[in-house]
Image (spheres, rainbow, N blue to C red):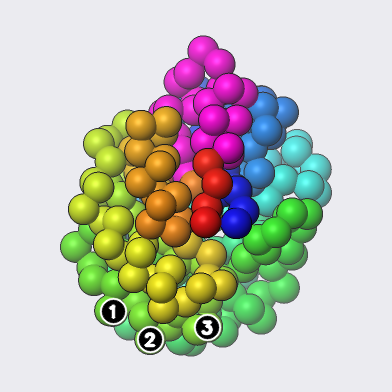
């Protein structure tokens, strides 16, 4: 058994203070940072791109692991710029590309530096929206480091956790015992147990952590969930 890794999503934080917010999350015990990139096309919202990531890397130094959640229509376009900006993992959406295999290869060859000191280490991530079946992801599972099962429709923080996505996580866990499986959307103290039971070991939590008066305690609580 092992405990889950926690990656706060800084989408719901004061974006004018992004560097400080990331620092605060790492000081509060975060294992990695989940950075949500939205292009206003794949999802109906815009956040930031690789220039912001480069600034964050310069401000935060080499240690924090940047898990880039690419909610963009042409994920092929940003692999090299994100690698150059200091990203560690590039998670793209299966729905956004016609050639996942090629993209996984490009990510692997991009020289994206892995610097997460604690296990699990991951580089290529593949995400599925709630409407996409896990069978569609399965053919690529042997080539990726992490599968991201979305537990809300991507686009906005602060939405309600979709418990009916848990069978996807359980199935992936049973078929691919050593695959990192991340859940993202509405995850917090009230849904963490369901995620852990299903077998998720990388936990994204946005509003539950960032908007809390005591993010350190929330992160500790989420981390303390033991996965069998
Ligand atoms: C949603 C994003 C999530 C989101 C998580 O499109 O991918 O990372 O910000 O935030 P919460 O935990 O508030 O749902
Ligand atoms: Zn996300």
* Residue that badge 2 annotates: 139
For the residue pair 68 and 173, the one nearer the viewer reads as 173
Give, as a single range, the part of the protein colored magenta: 204-224
Task: Name the residue rendered at 49%, 47% in the picture.
Answer: 203
Tell which circle, 1 or 3, labels the residue nearer the N-terminal end: 1
Label 1: which secondary element: helix
Marks 2 and 3 sit apart, C-alpha to C-alpha, by 9 Å
Q: Is residue 157 visible?
A: no
Marks 1 and 2 sit apart, C-alpha to C-alpha, by 7 Å
Label 2: which secondary element: helix
Answer with the quarter of the image where residue 173 lies: bottom left
Q: Position of residue 79 (x, y in %)?
A: 56, 69
* Residue that badge 3 annotates: 143
- Mark 1 Cα within 10 Å, few/some/many (few <14, many 20+)? few
Relative to 175, is 109 on the left or the right? Answer: right
Task: Name the residue rendered at 56%, 72% in the picture.
Answer: 178
Dominant SS in magenta: helix
For disc 1, does the CB lie below 8 Å from ligand 1? no
Task: Name the residue rendered at 51%, 73% in the picture.
Answer: 177
Residue 152 falls inside the magenta stretch:
no
Q: Position of residue 198 (x, y in %)?
A: 38, 57
Q: Position of residue 42 (x, y in %)?
A: 29, 58
Marks 1 and 3 sit apart, C-alpha to C-alpha, by 14 Å
Task: Name the residue rendered at 60%, 30% in the picture.
Answer: 220
Answer with the quarter of the image where residue 67 lies: bottom right
Number of marks drawn: 3
Residue 217 falls inside the magenta stretch:
yes
* Residue that badge 1 annotates: 136
């Amino acid at each position: 058994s092992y405990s889950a890794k926690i990656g706060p999503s800084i989408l719901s934080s004061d974006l004018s203070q992004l560097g400080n917010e990331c620092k605060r999350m790492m000081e509060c015990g975060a294992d990695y940072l989940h950075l949500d990139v939205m292009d206003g096309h794949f999802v109906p919202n815009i956040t930031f791109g690789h220039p912001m990531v480069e600034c964050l890397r310069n401000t935060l130094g080499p240690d924090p692991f940047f898990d880039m959640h690419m909610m963009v229509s042409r994920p092929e376009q940003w692999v090299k710029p994100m690698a150059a900006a200091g990203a560690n993992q590039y998670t793209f959406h299966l729905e956004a590309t016609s050639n996942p295999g090629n993209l996984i290869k490009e990510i692997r060859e991009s020289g994206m530096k892995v610097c997460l000191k604690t296990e699990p280490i991951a580089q290529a991530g593949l995400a599925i929206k709630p409407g996409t079946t896990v069978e569609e992801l399965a053919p690529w599972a042997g080539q990726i480091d992490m599968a991201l099962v979305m537990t809300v429709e991507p686009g906005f923080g602060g939405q309600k956790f979709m418990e009916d996505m848990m069978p996807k996580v359980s199935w992936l866990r049973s078929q691919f015992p050593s695959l990192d499986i991340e859940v993202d959307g509405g995850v917090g103290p009230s849904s963490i147990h369901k995620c852990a039971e299903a077998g998720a070991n990388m936990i994204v939590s946005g509003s539950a952590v960032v908007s809390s008066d005591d993010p350190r305690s929330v992160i500790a609580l989420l981390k303390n969930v033991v996965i069998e």
